[in-house]
Amino acid sequence: MKNLEHKGYTGSIEYSKEDDLLYGKVLGINGLISYEGKTGSELEADFKAAVDAYLSDCKEEGITPEKPFKGSFNVRISAELHQKAALLAMEDRMSLNNFVAESIRERVFRIFGKLSPRTSR
């Protein structure tokens, strides 16, 4: 396992040699939600507790919890790459957005295999 998963949130797994401690943070959100543990089990339990506490705090404060990986992001590329991608998209009679999504989907599929229906947008 390279990441932790709980209630739609993904957490990193890092190791501090100096502290002999596992630690991580929730990925894909602007806020900082961190957790730690001496063992993998402790790390996972603290991760789940941190996510649950975040969701509980949001509910108490009446705010909407931030959703990780919303499906929208900005990409900055060279003008030349932008032009070539746009021309290829036009040749395939698709939008540049669909071209980029398909290119990412192909790369992710090669690495991770089958995508769930939810992610194959």
Image (cartoon, rainbow, N blue to C red):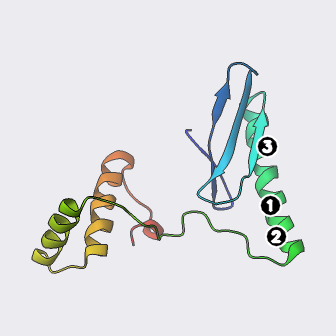
Given contact means CB atoms under 8 Å apart, are the residues at marks 2 and 3 in contact?
no
In the displayed structure, 95 sits above or below 99; it is below
Measured as percent of width and height from the top left, residue 58 is found at: 82, 70
Q: Are marks 2 and 1 in contact (CB under 8 Å)?
A: yes
Q: Secondary structure at mark 1?
A: helix
Q: Identify the residue at horizontal 74%, vertical 46% (top origin).
A: 34
Q: Which residue was labeled with disc 1?
A: 54
- Tag 3 or tag 2, which sits nearer the N-term? 3
What residue does disc 3 label? 45
Is residue 60 left or right of 41 when viewed as pictured? right
From the top left corner, tell me how far across and down residue 115 is, in percent.
40, 59
Q: Quadrant of the C terminus?
A: bottom left
The residue carrying mark 2 is: 58
Q: Amino acid at mark 2?
A: Cys
Q: Amino acid at mark 3?
A: Ala
Q: Indicate which disc, 3 or 1, sits on the residue closer to the N terminus.
A: 3
Task: Residue at 42% x, 67% y: name it.
Answer: 74
Q: Amino acid at mark 1?
A: Tyr
| Left or right of 11 on screen, residue 93 | left
Where is 107 relative to 42, above or below? below
Quadrant in which the N terminus is drawn: top right
For residue 7, what is the image quadrant?
bottom right
- Mark 2, other Cα within 10 Å: few <14 / some 14–19 / many ≥20: some
Picture layout, residue 20 above or below residue 86: above
Q: Rounded to the nearest whole Å, what is the CA distance between mark 3 and mark 1?
A: 14 Å
Instruction: Decide: is 104 above or below 111.
Output: below
Q: CA distance from mark 2 to mark 1?
A: 6 Å
